[in-house]
Structure formats: structure tokens, C-alpha cells
Amino acid sequence: MTEQNFSSMRAAMVESQLRTSGVDDQRVVAVMARMPREDFVPAERRAMAYIDRAIPLGGGRAINPPLATGRLLKEAQVEPGDRVLLIGAATGYSAALLKALGAQVTAVEEEGGPEVMGYDGAILRGPLSGGAADGAPYDLLFIDGAVEQVPAAIVKQLADGARVVTGIIERGVTRLCSGRAVNGILGLTSLTDVEMVVLPGFAAPEGFIF
């Protein structure tokens, strides 16, 4: 597969997956149009880099479909200088996009999780549900996948009024949600159904209803 082919596939992703599905923030579209997604997937799966489905990475982890990433970035409304806590960094694709948008990124991936590829920043290793308290407070929580609940331990790491984007699992369906943390309380609004990878370690207590 040549670089020209990847460029054509990237352009097709933007036109057929992003622009037709509500990703209309021009900064997000521009950064995804130039970021070589193929650099963030294992060599044996590079040809799959721009498909409209999650790409398996092994060990039960995967990279979100491009549309999920684009919708999360659009709702995140990233501004230069934002302190971002990224949960579920995987190989570093979303971290690289956030950095390209001017954010200061603290990225977390679980121990034994996917190998970092194509991202020149640090990725912390530890339980995803623990966040990264040392870098708090954060202006934006970006959960790159779907969870059953957002743990209180992570909410406590957010600045008052911090923005939050995530996928939430509701009755087996993954939904894009956004909201804010105010006075230590997280409020989320469900926006639309979007195919997302499910992150490990975020099971809700039995009887919990979002």
C-alpha cells in the first residue's frame, strides 16, 4: 500500500464518514484529514486504517471507528491550551489529534494494553478507571470509548465546569454523550447512537441505572 493510496483513503474517510455524519467542525475535519491514521495501527492491519469499523489491536482492545473519534472531538470543543485527560489512549491516535488541536494531553492506557504507535508524547500506564490525579485539574475529560459509568475518582480530577465527552453503554447500546462536571457532580446528555469500542474496567455496580 503506497502513501498515495493512504492519502486517497484518508480523503474518502473524511468525505464519506465524517462530513455525512455530523462532523462539521472544520478544525476537527482538517486535523483528521492530515493525520496519518495508518501509522497508529499494527503493520498487518494498515490496509484497514480507514474502514468505518473498530480495528482490533489484540488483548480485547481496539481503535474506535473514525466517526466515533470525529464526533467525540467535535463535541469536545478543544481549545488551544486545554488540559485534557484522555482515558483509553490505545496506540495514541486520539492523543495525537488532541495535541494537534493545541491541547496539553495526559493520556492513560492500561498496563499491558496496546503498544504506542505514531505518537511522540508519553502515555501513562495504569487502571483506566483511576485516571491521572497528578496532572489534575483538567479542563476536558475525553474518554475514547464507551463505559457503563464514569467513576467518581475521575470526576474529582476535573476542574469545575470541565467539559466531558464519552460513550455510555445504555441497555447494550453505545451512545455518544457530552456534559460538564460542576461542583464535583457530572451531568451528561445522550446525543446519538454511535458504534464505539467498550473500555475495560468501568462496569457499573449491580442495580445501577444511568
Image (spheres, rainbow, N blue to C red):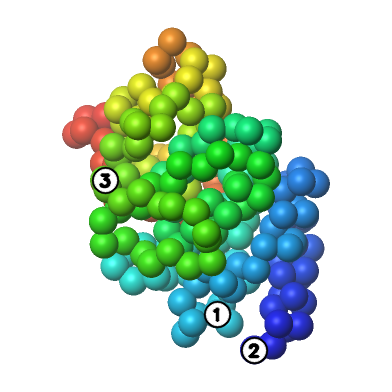
The amino acid on which the numbered mark 1 sits, given as a three-letter code, is: Arg
Residue labelled with disc 3: 127
Q: Which mark is residue 131?
A: none
The amino acid on which the numbered mark 2 sits, given as a three-letter code, is: Met
Q: Disc 1 vs disc 3: Cβ atoms closer than 8 Å?
A: no
Distance between the alpha carbons at the discs numbered 3 and 2: 36 Å
Is the residue marked by circle 3 packed among few (<14), some (14-19), or many (20+) residues within 10 Å?
A: some
Distance between the alpha carbons at the discs numbered 1 and 3: 28 Å
Can you name the residue that lies furthest to the top here? 183
| Picture residue at 35% right of the left edge, 36% below the top | 132
**Disc with the residue nearer the chain's start (3 vs 2):** 2
Residue 189 in view in this figure = no
Q: Disc 2 vs disc 1: Cβ atoms closer than 8 Å?
A: yes
Residue labelled with disc 1: 46
Q: Position of residue 200 (x, y in %)?
A: 30, 51
Q: Disc 3 vs disc 2: Cβ atoms closer than 8 Å?
A: no
Q: Nearer the viewer, residue 208 or 99?
A: 99
Q: Quadrant of residue 2?
A: bottom right
Residue labelled with disc 2: 1
For the C terminus, the quadrant is top left
The amino acid on which the numbered mark 3 sits, given as a three-letter code, is: Pro
Q: Position of residue 133 (x, y in %)?
A: 34, 31
Q: Position of residue 135 (x, y in %)?
A: 41, 32
Distance between the alpha carbons at the discs numbered 2 and 1: 8 Å
